[in-house]
Image (spheres, rainbow, N blue to C red):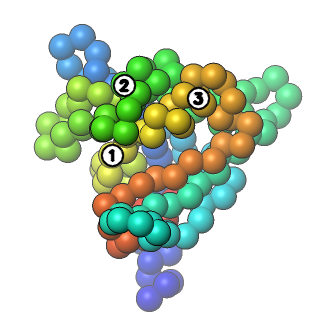
Amino acid sequence: EVIDLLEERGTVRIDIAYPEGNGTAVQEGVLIQDDFEEICTATQRDRGTGAYVPVTVRNTAPDGEQSPAHAFQAAVVQRGFPQAYESRGDTCRYNPETGETTTPCLLLVVDGDVVNSFGMAPDLADSMARGSWAETGNFRLTTGNFSEARSISLNL
């Protein structure tokens, strides 16, 4: 069963969908599989419902190049996450049917198909705006249930 899951693993990337003008634009490949230093297993939340996948983005790069963590941080700030996610009630409003959004969202894309969309916790968006997040490169991809988190962990 594990071998089947690994053989099914596709090409995975994280894109950013963001409002632009009268529609939605997408910045593709802000993170690709090789950009991740560590992808942990899916974890059930201690309180309430939901689950998450802790990940670490590499913050090292060859001389003269920007690390994946620094490039991701810059893209998140440029696309307006710190302004869009100022309180816990702010959410990603990506519509998978139309591909439109009214807020910036991270999109998990497997083999060219969007399989999940994520907003951002205000403290994470703030640390990216301050420029300090890329030092550790840690964040959590949060989902509504454990099976979804497990699928994300396996895809990455």
Q: Earlier in the sequence, mark 2 or mark 3?
A: 2
Residue at image position (56%, 48%) is 139
Q: Position of residue 85 (x, y in %)?
A: 39, 30
Q: Which mark is residue 128?
A: 3
> Is residue 106 left or right of 114 when viewed as pictured?
right
Q: Are marks 2 and 3 in contact (CB under 8 Å)?
A: no
Cα distance in 3D space between marks 2 and 3: 13 Å
- Mark 1 or 2: in front is 2
**Residue, far bottom:** 1
Seen in the picture, residue 148 relative to 66 is either above or below; the reply is below
Residue at image position (55%, 70%) is 41
**Residue, far front:** 47
Query: What SS does tag 2 mark?
Result: helix
Q: Earlier in the sequence, mark 1 or mark 2?
A: 2
Q: Position of residue 15 (x, y in %)?
A: 42, 37
Residue holding disc 1: 117
Q: Position of residue 74 (x, y in %)?
A: 58, 23
Task: Name the amino acid, label 2.
Answer: Ala
> Is residue 121 left or right of 101 when viewed as pictured?
right
Residue at image position (41%, 27%) is 86
Residue holding disc 2: 84
Q: Quadrant of the N terminus?
A: bottom left
Q: Earlier in the sequence, mark 3 or mark 1?
A: 1
Task: Name the amino acid, label 3.
Answer: Met
Residue 64 is drawn in which quadrant? top right
